[in-house]
Image: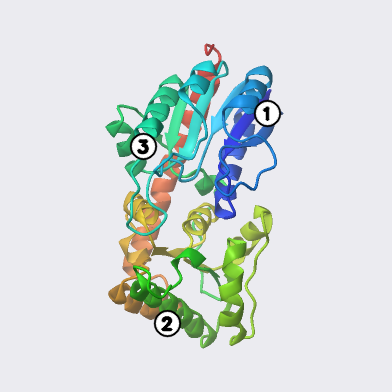
């Protein structure tokens, strides 16, 4: 069996965690399948090959694939959704189609860019044609309902790159994911002072860890983050860890940790799969949706809030006491929900297998 997976262009390795979660489930249901990745988009025009479910890619998919997957990541964000296609191309697809792991929500703080009518029409046409639509959170389910569509909330596929039981032990080793460079303070830009709070808190988190009897590492998820991290970490005699577009060594670092401080959403999601307790730093509507889906207010901190800055510094400063009773209760609840979404995820993929038997 040949499966074509249209993957959004990314320089953030966290999106590849999502890809890995999708591929793991596909291989469970379709043993021996060949999964070919094609670019769903190319916003920075770095690809040297055809882009999107259109033109030459559409011809190849129709000729070669038995199933086409689109996802995951933040593909419903506007103004143009993150799949390059057209109504004519959607109508011309003659291969069973499924959307997996997509989500809605701004990746730039609280600023939401509405979708164009063209994008809404393409989403409606493609999703009505699909044999399955799985999204990552309740906010994305509500988004589809507003368009007259239905989607199954399976949680983010990156949740199930691993499925280890929750592990709580005395913290000795901590990993910290670096905040995205796009949120660094820029003089004259809106949000300058809020971003100053974020970077000041991040620095104090590292300082606090260096003063305690724990080892720690900072992990960059994007090569654009290296430039600001290098001088910041020199004062601690450290360099950030970065492994490019190979997710495997990232996973190994996460699994070694006793606690993670996650300035990147997909690090938190992956740690949930690996059974590693974590604190999540909330930057935008995606992280808010994750926080609300799992009910982890005690484990979540708004990146730009002075109040939450103080909360986070207190929490990291007393890391040897982690988790406190409210934190432990929310961790246990989160893992209970993870198992529920695992069942929903398995049922969704099994449904694809079933529907493929009757799909045109």
Which residue does the numbered mark 3 point to in the structure image?
A: 116
Q: Secondary structure at mark 3?
A: loop
Q: Quadrant of residue 175?
A: bottom right
Q: Residue shown at 49%/35% (left/top)? A: 100
Chain-order first, disc 3 or disc 1: 1
Mark whose residue sits in front, 3 or 1: 3
Disc 3 and disc 2: Cα gap in Å? 46 Å
Which residue does the numbered mark 1 point to in the structure image?
A: 31
Give whichever of 240, 211 is nearer the camera.
Answer: 240
User: What x and y, as percent, mark residue 342?
Assistant: 47, 40
Which residue does the numbered mark 2 point to in the structure image?
A: 317
Q: Quadrant of residue 282?
A: bottom left
Q: Residue shown at 68%/25% (left/top)? A: 2
Residue 306, above or below 213: above
User: What x and y, as percent, mark residue 240?
Assistant: 62, 73
Q: Are marks 3 and 2 in contact (CB under 8 Å)?
A: no
Residue count near mark 1 (Cα–Cα under 10 Å), binned few <14, some 14–19, many ≥20: few
Q: Residue shown at 65%/65% (left/top)? A: 242
Disc 3 and disc 1: Cα gap in Å? 39 Å
- The quarter of the image holding the C terminus is top right
User: What x and y, as percent, mark residue 114?
Assistant: 33, 43
Q: Secondary structure at mark 2?
A: helix
């Amino acid at each position: 069996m040949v499966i074509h997976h249209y993957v959004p262009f990314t320089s953030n390795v966290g999106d590849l965690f999502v890809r890995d979660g999708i591929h793991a489930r596909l291989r469970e249901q379709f043993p021996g399948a060949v999964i070919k990745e094609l670019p769903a988009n190319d916003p920075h025009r770095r690809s040297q090959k055809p882009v999107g479910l259109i033109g030459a890619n559409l011809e190849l998919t129709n000729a070669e694939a038995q199933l086409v997957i689109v996802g995951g990541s933040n593909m419903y964000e506007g103004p143009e959704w993150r799949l390059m296609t057209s109504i004519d191309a959607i109508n011309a697809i003659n291969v069973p189609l499924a959307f997996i792991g997509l989500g809605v929500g701004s990746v730039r703080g609280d600023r939401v860019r509405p979708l164009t009518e063209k994008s809404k029409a393409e989403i409606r046409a493609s999703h009505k044609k699909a044999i399955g639509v799985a999204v990552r959170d309740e906010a994305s389910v509500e988004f589809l309902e507003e368009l007259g569509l239905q989607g199954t909330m399976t949680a983010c596929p990156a949740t199930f790159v691993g499925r280890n039981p929750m592990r709580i032990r005395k913290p000795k080793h901590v990993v910290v994911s670096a905040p995205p460079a796009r949120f660094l303070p820029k003089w004259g830009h809106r949000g300058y002072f809020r971003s100053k709070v974020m970077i000041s808190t991040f620095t104090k988190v590292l300082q606090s860890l260096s003063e305690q009897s724990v080892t720690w590492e900072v992990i960059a998820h994007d090569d654009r983050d290296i430039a600001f991290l290098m001088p910041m970490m020199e004062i601690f005699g450290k360099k950030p860890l970065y492994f490019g577009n190979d997710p495997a060594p990232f996973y190994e670092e996460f699994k070694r940790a006793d606690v993670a401080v996650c300035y990147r959403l997909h690090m938190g999601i992956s740690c949930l799969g690996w059974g590693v307790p974590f604190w999540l730093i909330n930057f935008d509507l995606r992280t808010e949706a994750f926080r609300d889906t799992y009910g982890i207010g005690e484990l979540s901190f708004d990146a730009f809030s002075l109040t939450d800055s103080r909360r986070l510094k207190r929490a990291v400063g007393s890391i040897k006491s982690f988790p406190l009773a409210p934190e432990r209760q929310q961790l246990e609840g989160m893992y209970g929900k993870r198992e529920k979404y695992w069942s929903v995820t398995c049922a969704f993929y099994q449904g694809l297998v079933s529907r493929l038997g009757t799909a045109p």
